[in-house]
Image (cartoon, rainbow, N blue to C red):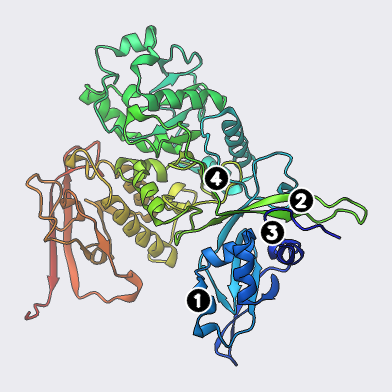
Amino acid sequence: TLQPWPFSICPVCFEGPISARLGLLGRPLKKQWNEVSRRWSWTGGYLYTISPEALLSSAASGCKWCDFLVQRCGYTKQDLEGVQWSFRRTLRIRIGRMAAEWILRVVVDGVETHSWGYAVATSLAVDDPAAKWIPRRPRLPDVGSKRTLALAKACLQQCIREHERCKVLYRLAFPELPAFVPTRLIDCKCPQRPRVVLTKGVPPGAYIALSYVWGEEQPHRATEANISSYMTDGIDPATLPQTIRDAIHITRELGLNFLWVDSLCIIQDSPEDKHRELVFMRNVYLYAHLTIDAASAWKASDGFLEDRPPLKPWVVLPFVCPRRFANSPTEIGNIQIYTRSSTGDSIVGQDVLTNNYRRYYTRQRAWCLQETMLSTRSLVFTPWTVQLRCQTMTQNIGGADHDVLGDAPRLPDVVLHADREIERYSDEWIDIRQRWHDVVEDYSRRKLSYASDKLVACAGLAEMFSRALDSEYAAGLWNDDFLLHDLLWNVQLHFHPHPKEYLAPSWSWASFEDATVYYHLDVRHSQAMAVVVSCSVVAQDDALPLGPVASGRLVLQAHLFEC
């Protein structure tokens, strides 16, 4: 006979829902519509009953599970004792998880008490017996520790070995091109004296790229005056901002020697070098073995390896582990319960959600969008933990429950590699056109330090879409039979007048300096009311045909309607 948990759970709950393991290991919950009762009904999990009076009394006496139900499910003493409960003798409480997720669901009298459920995890203690049964763990706040980076390296190797989609994409991207390596890389073999090297002889893929926010002047940047010294004498790490020093540390901890950082691998005061490197910018991230996404650093001097504040669970409960054999002793571990926000994040309260999003700085910068979307794999140092993002999945290092906050959408596989042609105007082709609208909306929300970079900072993505769509690019739009749909963007003109500086033709969304663009029309459910007679743009630089434009001309033919 199991003994009552001595200090946190009342005997009734221990013998009931706790001994039933909160229904997490039993038959999964299932929600289905009942045509007879005209309401949703639930099956599976663990079902038990308790009176409102007993629930209140047990919670007041210190039972953590009863107190959790009272406090977190929105019940108050007035609710349970009021008129609405006077006719009800018992509450029917069903708990468990739905298939393929580790989210605790609590259903009281047929109504789920929290629409997004509660994340569950076990402690990080290696000897916690519950870890054998509950795969989720708390987030790792020590993102720069050897333990966390060893786990990150293991996840990376698992992606390389087991994720078929990632392997195919990495192998097939631009097969007609020779293996790409950036012109310069930072040699990190001696972290005390890193140096810039030319990449002749470096094997393809043997480098890490850094995606970060400058946020301030970069006095360490490579120039025509210091690049020779950086290559022969190396760089004093004390002169580098913390973000770059952190990236060098990560590169070495992951077992690699080479790192690409734009401020050091591009000669910043050489227009010729910047122009030459800009042409191949998309390939830097596409062919990198891994991209370090310093999402939590507002500026380069901040760094991104500081410990994150630990996430405190709402309640810690005992977990009665199943017996492997009839004569095996009963093992009791612990299980931690966290609330989840509407975005699926295991965080406490909307204030923390908002604060974390504001601190996800690479998701606020325009240049970082294509760096994220073109990277085959990224190690993302978020404001709360570290994640591995690949083309197959995004996972928190250490098995923590995954948060979707800030996770940029992935490009369709066919956009990332050119192994086949797409039938023009097929459903797949149209889906890619629609995806471009999603990219534009995301990109337009982000900030640029220089308005003149409006079309430059997304040129790498535009080139990828151009190959997939086989369409002519026209200052952020596509000159094909669906050009009219591309023209149906909108912004709030009252708040975003046209800038004085020419950025793009007025019919392009890129003509606005700082405005969020919206598309509201699906190209498959609309009818054209005009005809495109001609559309053309003149690039400022022939070497950057998808970059900034000098001029543009669009001619439409349509009936006139009286307003």
Whether residue 44 can be seen here: no
Q: Say what amino acid the circle numbered 1 marks.
A: Asp
Left or right of residue 413, residue 264 in this image: left
Local SS, label 2: strand
Q: Position of residue 401 (x, y in %)?
A: 56, 51
Quadrant of image for the N terminus:
bottom right
Local SS, label 3: loop
The nearer-to-camera label among 3 and 4 is: 3
Residue lying at 62% horizontally and 68% vertically, measured from the top left = 57
Mark 1: give few (<14), some (14-19) or many (20+) Cα within 10 Å: few
Q: Say what amino acid the circle numbered 3 marks.
A: Ile
Q: Which mark is residue 332?
A: 2
Circle 4 is placed at which residue position?
A: 396
Q: Which mark is residue 9?
A: 3
Residue lying at 19% horizontally and 70% vertically, measured from the top left = 531
User: Whole-Å distance between the Cαs marked 1 and 3?
Assistant: 23 Å
Q: Position of residue 374 (x, y in %)?
A: 42, 43
Circle 1 is placed at which residue position?
A: 79
In the rendered view, tell whether residue 74 sits above or below residue 516.
below
